[in-house]
Image (cartoon, rainbow, N blue to C red):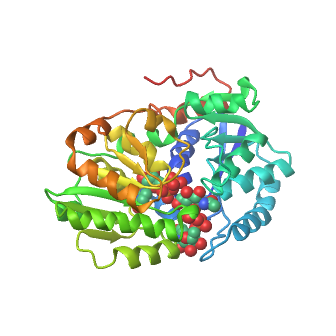
Amino acid sequence: MKKVMLVFGTRPEAIKICPLVNELKTRKGIQTVVCVTAQHRQMLDQVLETFNVVPDYDLNIMKDRQTLFDITTAVLNSIKEVLEKEKPDVVLVHGDTSTTFVTALACFYLQLPVGHVEAGLRTYNIYSPYPEEFNREAVSIVSQYNFAPTPLSRQNLLNEGRKAENVYVTGNTVIDAMQHTVREDYTHPELDWVGDGKLIFITAHRRENLGEPMHCMFRAIRRVLDEHPECKAVYPIHMNPLVRQAAEEELGGCDQIHIIEPIEVFDCHNFEARSFLCLTDSGGIQEECPSYGVPVLVMRDTTERPEGVDAGTLKLVGTDEETIYRTFKLLLECEEEYNKMSHACNPYGDGYACERIADILEGKEYSPWIPG
Ligand code: UD1
Ligand code: UDP
């Protein structure tokens, strides 16, 4: 019996790793141990509940307005004991958060094998996204199993000298999570409010965008909304108080925008699927919206998910107010431009990533995901 420990701490890690927890639990050859750092508290618990995952360990590290130093030291100090007690055969981490990096570091210190889910995403700009690019590059150095979501992410790892036999193309587990969420008959009071209007879906939280860039993003959105009364924006806001303050200052009092508390992932996918357009700096949303044919304006200077840009569904608009204003407005006013971006495609997976990862961990044959 192989003991697999999964460690995660934030909302997006949970959304992408809980389906894997549930898949691993069905495997006879695997004993599953779940440890959450709770780098996010409320936003993590919301996802655990949705997927019915009850952690074996909860490090409960979140602090209000935590710094990178806070997260790093809290996870490093508290995970050691859990790893030493459980002595897992492999520790799975996901993506690029501080929880992910620090857990991989702790495994390295204890010489425990690491499996990296969503490996090989890159911008090659260490400050964008910050600190995620550093985190994921560092995790790749110590990982024995690299579960790359796409052929491009595999190629990045090979270019960096990772051994081909340790890199597997599995598809992204978020596509697995999306298989059963969107429903034709889905209703929600916020969608009733939008009615026949155009739903504009907004999220924002990136550390490097806090401060002036975020103010610019919000100002651009507000200017376009003021000119387009047919648009109704829904913005489930991140719990970071700095994000909330900027949103209140720039978007407060605007009747065309509803700023609401974080919604369950089930609701989030249904909102995305019904949107006319999405404006975000989120990573996960760049992977989800292309499946629904919903254009995404990515309010960042770089993306580690160029597959969606190549497919035409994502456009990088940075955080400059004028650029976001002009691009957003153009998509509302020019049908041809909108149609160019609005077509469903699935460059990130086929819904079988968790099965593939579980097969690999059990030592079974696996067939890589091949897009298209
Ligand atoms: C973290 C990750 C980022 C990921 C994002 C997903 C790092 C360094 N950053 O960024 O990669 O894209 O999560 O959302 O790992 N808060 C709450 N309740 C919650 C969650 C957050 O109150 O459930 C507040 C707290 O005040 C917390 C702050 O938000 O201190 C920031 O959380 P933190 O995890 O440090 O950064 P994120 O921006 O969420
Ligand atoms: N999401 C959610 N509720 C919300 C906003 C987002 O469930 O109110 C989901 C979304 O569908 C995606 C993930 O959270 O799967 C993205 O998380 P986030 O933007 O916090 O982090 P990132 O992906 O940028 O790391």
Q: Residue at x 46, y 63 (%)?
A: 46
Q: Quadrant of the C terminus?
A: top left
Q: Residue at x 66, y 57 (%)?
A: 131
The single residue placed furthest to the front in the displayed view is 322
Q: Residue at x 33, y 78 (%)?
A: 252
On the rendering, which quadrant does ligand 1 occupy? bottom right
For the residue pair 167 and 217, the one nearer the viewer reads as: 217
Q: Position of residue 29 (x, y in %)?
A: 66, 33
For the residue pair 326 and 173, the one nearer the viewer reads as: 326
- Picture layout, residue 294 above or below residue 146: below
Q: Is residue 155 left or right of residue 319?
A: right
For the residue pair 259 and 133, the one nearer the viewer reads as: 133
> Can the viewer see residue 83?
yes
The single residue placed furthest to the left in the displayed view is 196
Q: What number of labels is visible?
A: 0
Q: Quadrant of the N terminus?
A: top right
- Picture layout, residue 121 above or below residue 298: above
- Picture layout, residue 298 above or below residue 264: above
Q: Position of residue 205 (x, y in %)?
A: 50, 63
Q: Quadrant of residue 155?
A: top right
Q: Position of residue 164 (x, y in %)?
A: 71, 24
Q: Position of residue 213 (x, y in %)?
A: 50, 65
Q: Residue at x 27, y 40 (%)?
A: 337
> Can the viewer see residue 274?
no
Q: Is residue 122 left or right of residue 283?
A: right
